[in-house]
Image (cartoon, rainbow, N blue to C red):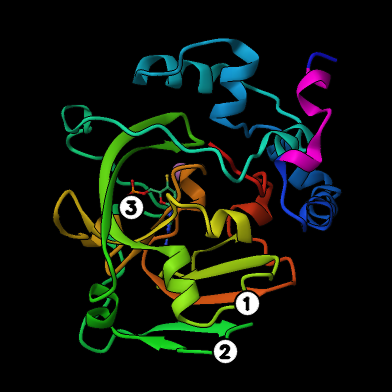
Amino acid sequence: MRFRKIAQKPSTFLSSHADSIIKDARKELENPARRLLGKRILTLGGLMLLSGCDLSDDKSVNSLLRRMSSFNDGVQALLFNPHRMAPTYPESMITRPFPFNAFYGVDDVPEVDPASYRLQLGGLVKGKCAWTLDELRALPQESQITRHICIEGWSAIGRWGGVRFAEFLKRSGADLTAKYVSLHCADNYWTSIDMPTALHAQTLLTLSYDGAVLPAKYGFPMKLRIPTKLGFKNPKHIMTITVTNEYPGGYWENQGYNWFGGS
Ligand SMILES: Nc1nc2c(c(=O)[nH]1)N[C@H]1C(S)=C(S)[C@@H](COP(=O)(O)O)O[C@H]1N2
Ligand SMILES: [Mo]
């Protein structure tokens, strides 16, 4: 087993809830239909370790993604390091135009009305449970140029701006010791992440793309940008956020995509 060396010290890689989170994910994967697709996912960081490849350009990342056909869920969990930083890129490397993707075509992108929009926060939250767009825009903003990696075999570099999700959760009085954060979208898409990923310094509640208001196709009014995770774990058009200890699953996750979905 060539993974053994890397996998030997899970406790140093994972959060205090790691064991129970992995158990929840395993339970999901016991369903054979889910297991089938679950094997196709990988982490870019893990691949760099395992393959020794320098995955720095589109071609090498994409060809490796296509060649990868199996990846063990447990191994990925062990490779997941909540403190690892995703690579950032210079402005000159931004992919133009940035691709659109969803479980439907671009003509069906949901239109969210900015004036009546309220980001709802539920579950294990003691503070503010509804945010207007202006309130979110008034929070400290930062920007990042990172690579979005889609499980379907493409990747692209983009620039997103917004509020650190950790900052938003703190200001909302969310229970930061909870296991999961689930995110429901205007198109009924949903996904969920573990708390260490939610609190990761590069996880941004983005309100802008490439210096302008986030366009509808990229997720207006906001997209949670998680550069340490694959594209399907980066929800667009977020309406409701729930902090919970119950495993929430997700649209693709429930059809077999690996819950960890690291990139
Ligand atoms: N609400 C919503 N978010 C979503 C999806 C979706 O279908 N609906 N698709 C996911 C997938 S699989 C990808 S690759 C990215 C695509 O984001 P983009 O259109 O900004 O490239 O959005 C992710 N977030
Ligand atoms: Mo994707």
Q: Which mark is residue 205?
A: none
Q: Nearer the viewer, residue 213 or 152?
A: 213
Q: Are marks 1 and 2 in contact (CB under 8 Å)?
A: yes
- The x and y percentages for residue 145 are 28, 40
Nearer-N-terminus badge (1/3):
3
Mark pair 1, 3: CA separation: 37 Å
Mark 1 vs mark 3: in front: 1
Q: Is residue 235 left or right of residue 113?
A: right
Residue drawn where x is 14% and y is 53% of the image: 211
Nearer-N-terminus badge (1/2):
2
The answer to whether residue 194 is seen in the rendering is no
Look at the image and say whether residue 8 sits in the magenta stretch.
yes
Q: Which residue is mark 3?
A: 105
Q: Which residue is mark 1?
A: 175
Few, some or many residues within 10 Å of mark 2 (<14, 14–19, 20+)? few
Q: Quadrant of residue 195?
A: bottom right
Amino acid type, residue under disc 3 in the picture: Gly
Q: Secondary structure at mark 3?
A: loop
For residue 79, above or below residue 174: above
Q: Nearer the viewer, residue 29 or 91?
A: 91
Amino acid type, residue under disc 1 in the picture: Asp
> Which residue sits furthest top?
52
Few, some or many residues within 10 Å of mark 3 (<14, 14–19, 20+)? few
Q: Nearer the viewer, residue 259 or 35?
A: 259
Residue drawn where x is 65% and y is 22% of the image: 69
The answer to whether residue 184 is seen in the rendering is yes
Q: Which residue is mark 2?
A: 126
